[in-house]
Amino acid sequence: MRTLLATSVLVLFFSSNLLGQNISELEKKRGFRDFTLGQDFSMYKDRVWMTIADEEQNKNKKVKEYSLKDEIKVKDLDFMVTLKFYQDKLIEVSVYRLTKNINEFSSIKQSLFSLYGAVDNSHLDPNKPSDLRECNEVFLWNSESVGLELVHCTKEEPFLVEFTIWDIKANLKILKDEF
């Protein structure tokens, strides 16, 4: 009886881990909610805006960044969204908020771990981008053409909680076009 119980517990443990570790879901979804990488700007033009400073900054750039007019709810919390477009195609979705409550980050982290599998915290990686050097926790998932990054930065309160989904192939094309 104990052996059967122990075997059942092990099977349940490994099955739940395998179900959670499905990076192919990231590739299949290619975005977040109704923001799908590769979609045309026309799908979002009525939902986004750009500040005067953003307009000036974006004037001579190939990648255009817009803010969503309305906040969205994630786990009953309000988050802001920015969308980046290259050649009028969506290449990046950033969902973020400032908060003083670390549990908000932990809850989102657990959700992403259950969807795409647990990954190591990359905050000590010396090769991480300079804009992430102030971040306490950095988690990265990569499928064949989609990247996902979750960060928690506590330089000062309130701190940043952000997850970003980007099109790896589009970003490589941008780099090639710039050189």
Image: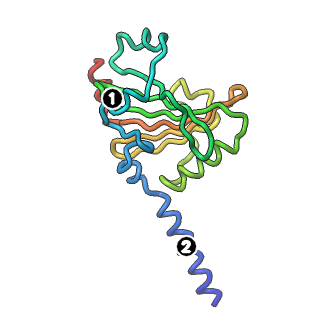
- In the image, residue 123 lies at what x, y percent? 59, 36
Residue 15 visible, this angle? yes
Q: Nearer the viewer, residue 37 or 80?
A: 80
What's the coloring here? rainbow
Circle 1 packing at 10 Å, graded few (<14), some (14-19), many (20+), is some
Q: Which mark is residue 85?
A: none
How far is the residue under mark 1 from the one under mark 2? 44 Å
The answer to whether 169 appears left or right of 2 in the picture is left
- In the image, residue 86 lies at what x, y percent? 32, 25
**Mark found first going from the N terminus, 1 or 2:** 2
Which quarter of the image is occupied by the N terminus? Answer: bottom right
Q: Nearer the viewer, residue 68 or 151?
A: 68
Residue positioned most to the bottom: 1
Q: Amino acid at mark 1?
A: Phe
Circle 2 packing at 10 Å, graded few (<14), some (14-19), many (20+), is few
Give SS at disc 1. Answer: helix
Query: Going 56% across and 52% down the picture, which residue do you hit?
Result: 111
Query: Going 33% across and 18% down the picture, which residue do you hit?
Result: 62
- In the image, residue 52 lies at what x, y percent? 47, 10
Give SS at disc 2. Answer: helix
Q: Which of the 4 image quadrants contains residue 66? A: top left
Q: Is residue 142 above or below residue 55?
A: below
Q: Are marks 1 and 2 in contact (CB under 8 Å)?
A: no
Tell which tag, 1 or 2, sits nearer the viewer.
1
| Residue under numbered circle 2 | 12
Q: Is residue 25 above or below residue 163?
A: below
Q: Nearer the viewer, residue 86 or 130?
A: 86
Q: Which mark is residue 41?
A: 1
Q: Amino acid at mark 2?
A: Leu
